Image (cartoon, grey):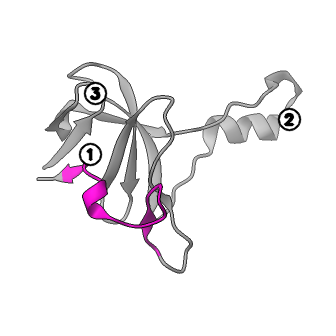
Amino acid sequence: MFHIYCPYCEEHREEEEFHPKGQAHIARPDDPDACSDEEWGDYLFFRDNPRGIHHELWVHAVGCRKFFNITRHTVSYEILETYKMGAQPQVTAAPRETGEALGAEGRADAKDIHEGVRA
């Protein structure tokens, strides 16, 4: 069972309390009236499905009911970080040849990534 850190409740809770809601950081077109049907369809229906680091939107449905973001590795299901809405991720995808997650300082360090743990 996963334990997920809620950045609003500031505690680890069981995964059953949370629900994934899709890809995070999706930018709405600046002028929806001026974009083509293809551009609008891409915005509404197409999402990234990477193998590796992925930023996702989740909700703490049984707890505080707030939305937040999770950075998760889609192959290992490891949660690398959780952060509040409006914040930017500290962990981003590394160049493809290394395959590591890089923190804000440009290094992969599991000690610095304490928000997500596996029980």
Q: Earlier in the sequence, mark 1 or mark 2?
A: 2
> Which residue occupies the extreme right position in the image?
34
Q: Which mark is residue 60?
A: 3
Horizontal relation, residue 20 to residue 14: left or right: right
Span shown in magenta: 99-117
* Secondary structure beneath label 2: loop
Q: Amino acid at mark 1?
A: Glu
Most foreground residue, 81 or 111: 111
Mark 2: few/some/many CA within 10 Å (<14, 14-19, 20+)? few
* Secondary structure beneath label 1: loop
Q: For residue 112, what is the image quadrant?
A: bottom left
Q: Earlier in the sequence, mark 3 or mark 2?
A: 2
Q: CA distance from mark 3 to mark 2?
A: 35 Å
- Residue at 44% over, 43% down: 56
- Residue at 54% over, 80% down: 97
- Residue at 44% over, 54% down: 91
Most foreground residue, 96 or 103: 103
